[in-house]
Amino acid sequence: MTEDEGLDVQDRPVSGEQLEHDWERALDAAGGAVSAADSAGTLRQDELDAERHQVNEERTWLGGIGSTMRKLFPRRGAGGDE
């Protein structure tokens, strides 16, 4: 990443919706990794179960806090912001 690209990311406003979307994508990737490990036989069943449980717990948590993130980080321009 160049210095200019880093500035663009920092200047971009953060919204709760974007945070939630990005977190969901990360959880999708984690779930895919667990499925790949299962297919490849690289983890024991108890490890796979634990990882699936962790991803599901994160999804549940995210579902519960999503509305709070949207309130804490409204879209720019929402609610009288710039």
Image (spheres, rainbow, N blue to C red):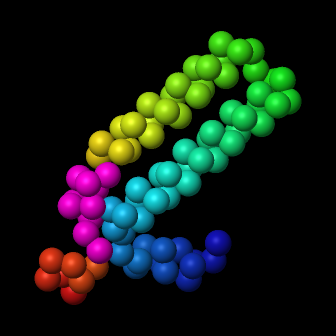
Q: Is residue 50 left or right of residue 39?
A: left
Furthest-bottom residue in view?
82
Rendering quarter of residue 60: top left
Q: Residue at x 38, y 44 (%)?
A: 62
Q: Nearer the viewer, residue 13 or 70?
A: 70
Asked whether residue 71 is drawn in magenta, I would say yes
Q: Residue at x 63, y 77 (%)?
A: 2
Tell me: residue 53, above or below residue 8. above
Q: Nearer the viewer, residue 48 or 72?
A: 48
Rendering quarter of residue 74: bottom left
- State the extent of the magenta-drawn residues as a range: 66-75
Residue 19, x across and y down, in percent = 41, 59
Provide the major secondary structure of the magenta segment: helix
Furthest-left residue in view?
80
Tell me: residue 82, above or below residue 39. below
- In what quadrant of the picture does the C terminus appear? bottom left
Asked whether residue 70 is drawn in magenta, I would say yes
